[in-house]
Image (cartoon, rainbow, N blue to C red):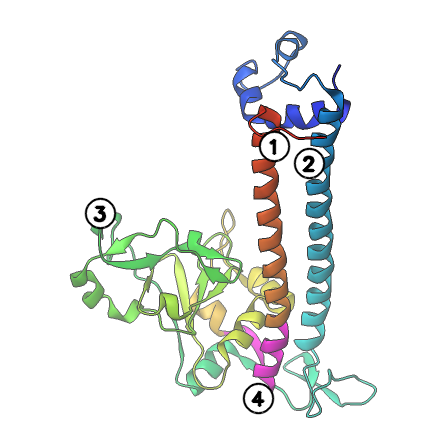
Amino acid sequence: KIDVEYLYYFLISLKNQIYKYSAQTTQSNLNAAIVKAFEIKYPEDKPEQLHIAEILSTADEAIAHTEALIAKYQRIKTGLMQDLLTKGIDDKGNIRSKSTHKFVVKNGIEVPKEWEVENLGALCKKGCGSIQTGPFGSQLHAEDYKEEGVPIITVEHLVDNRIAHENLPLVGEADYKRLKKYILNTGDLVFSRVGAIDRCSITTESEDGWMFSGRCLRVRPGKLFNSHFLMYQLNFDLVRNYILSNAVGSTMKCLNTTILSETPVFLPKTTEQIQISEKIESFENQLKQLNNRKAKLQSLKKGLMRDLLSGKVRVKI
């Protein structure tokens, strides 16, 4: 009576109910009696079942195709970042090659001869930037948060190189003025100080004037760095591995201003930094578009399942 593919999609639509039906012990589980009791709704006309299954499988194919594109672009981006952040771009706009360009070892790292290699703290200081730890617990407590005020970001808000805007604690005007040294400006980079210490996000105009908590570190790049270039570099495996291997703490990794200041980084000319960051950003934008497309397709499929499998919308053969 029931097409197997239609039944497959119908059972998927029961996912949330299945957890309610399941035997509630220390771990949810099903048994034959529970499954036999499932109430299955289906159109008696089997061609309609087949057509519903065909529509939903088409949506699945579109999602799978988009996921394959995301994986492909992610691989390309990873390879591109490896080349751009170790070889850079020459005056003609091409990625350098050892067969055509000179590479030298500086501070133990092989880089194009045009690049400088120095500790992050020293380069920030030269460019009038800084590295700053967030306010200590004695300076700001959870009970100081207000229902209205200026957002303060924590580790949880550092997501995919950006700052998330959900569930932000707020500080009042008095605390904001008192703790003004912990204010964020556009282009500042924010690190997690505990736990996922290799997590680094950039401050955009949307977060300009916000604050950062004691569990974070702020890197103000200064005049020598393009902020996006430095963000990509600090999220690059070579630099991340240095930070992780030099972190302190046994049960939980911790980062401090000394470790971050002593982290070696590359310094190409500003124009080259901008070119590198723009190339990486173009791939990130394509990935963002593909992920948005995937989310829309998943939402479309969810709506189709709700309407078609409930009989709310009938399919004409």
Location of residue 205 (image quadrant)? bottom left
Label 2 and label 4: CA atoms lie apart by: 49 Å
- Looking at the image, is mark 3 or mark 1 earlier in the sequence? 3
Magenta stretch bounds: 262-280
Q: Is residue 66 magenta?
A: no
- Looking at the image, is mark 4 or mark 3 earlier in the sequence? 3
Q: Amino acid at mark 4?
A: Thr
- Disc 1 designates what residue? 305
- Disc 3 designates what residue? 143
Q: Amino acid at mark 1?
A: Met
Label 1 and label 4: CA atoms lie apart by: 51 Å
- Looking at the image, is mark 1 or mark 2 earlier in the sequence? 2
Q: Amino acid at mark 2?
A: Leu
Element on which disc 4 rests: helix
Which residue is outermost to the top? 33
Element on which disc 1 rests: helix
Between disc 2 and disc 4, the foreground one is 2
